[in-house]
Image (cartoon, rainbow, N blue to C red):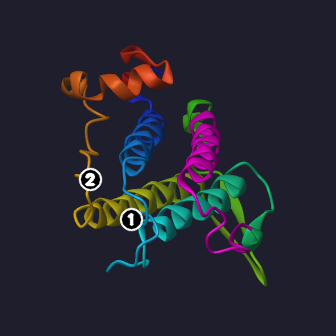
């Protein structure tokens, strides 16, 4: 299938965007002063730490389901599985890599496949493309909360939307270098 017509390309780009945005956001959070990461703030979740942990646990939940697993609600056994940023960032990077691998191997004919999502007493069944769209929207939504909360800290919020279009290549160069990625990978 021609790359131009490949409907799975959008999911590859969104998975790469996710990895790059999380890399930048975690690098920014690493600059916070002591106490700022866990400080109570006004948002959907009460702190930057709580919000980043929520992104992680929801990623565990959905990525496992998309891989065919049955982790289900065990992903949420602890609201905040990581108290510190280094361990949280490491776990987030690991699930980001799993999601990226899943999307890089995704074929157009798999987009409508049904995925089973274990939700305790019931099993949700939805299309793969719908679950991926939901997951990417969820990640972006909550990264936006962290971005807003950073405005009330000693660290300026980072730009988080420079990872999809070719014209932003220079703006994402540092993250690309840190991951060992080249532009052809991001644009394919």
* Boundaries of the magenta span: 75-102
Judge from the rendering whether residue 45 lies leftward or rightward of residue 163; answer left or right: right
Question: Dividing the image into 4 quarters, which one contains the C terminus?
Answer: top left
Classify residue 84 by image quadrant.
bottom right
Q: Secondary structure at mark 2?
A: loop
Q: List x then y, in percent, for residue 126.
A: 61, 64
Provide the residue designation for mark 2: 155
Give left or right: position of 16 versus 170. right
The residue at the point 65 percent across, 53 percent down is: 63
Residue pictured at 77% horizontal, 70% vertical: 74
Give the distance between the C-alpha atoms of the residues marked 1 and 2, in whole angstroms. 10 Å
**Residue at disc 1, secondary structure:** loop
Task: Name the mark on residue 22.
Answer: none
Q: Which residue is mark 1?
A: 36
Compare residues 117 and 92 and report the one nearer the observer. Answer: 92
How far across and down, in percent of the image, does residue 1 sit? 49, 22
- From the image, give the main secondary structure of the stretch colored magenta: helix
User: Is residue 91 on the magenta stretch?
Assistant: yes
Q: Nearer the viewer, residue 84 or 171?
A: 84
Note whether residue 188 is visible: no
Looking at the picture, how far across and down is residue 147, in whole percent?
Answer: 29, 59
Q: How many C-alpha atoms fall within 10 Å of the one at disc 2: few (<14), some, or many (≥20)?
A: some
């Amino acid at each position: 299938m021609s790359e131009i017509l490949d409907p799975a390309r959008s999911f590859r780009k969104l998975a790469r965007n996710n990895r790059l945005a999380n890399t930048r956001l975690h690098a920014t959070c690493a600059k916070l002063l002591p106490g700022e990461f866990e400080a109570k703030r006004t948002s959907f979740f009460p702190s930057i730490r709580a919000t980043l942990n929520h992104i992680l646990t929801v990623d565990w939940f959905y990525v496992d389901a998309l891989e065919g697993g049955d982790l289900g609600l065990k992903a949420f056994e602890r609201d905040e599985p990581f108290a510190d940023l280094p361990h949280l960032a490491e776990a987030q990077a690991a699930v980001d890599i799993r999601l990226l691998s899943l999307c890089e191997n995704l074929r157009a004919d798999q987009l409508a496949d049904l995925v089973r999502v274990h939700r305790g007493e019931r099993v949700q069944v939805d299309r793969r493309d719908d679950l991926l769209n939901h997951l990417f929207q969820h990640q972006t939504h909550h990264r936006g909360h962290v971005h807003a909360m950073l405005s009330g800290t000693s660290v300026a919020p980072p730009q988080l939307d420079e990872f999809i279009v070719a014209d932003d290549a220079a703006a994402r160069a540092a993250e690309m270098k840190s991951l060992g990625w080249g532009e052809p990978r991001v644009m394919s």
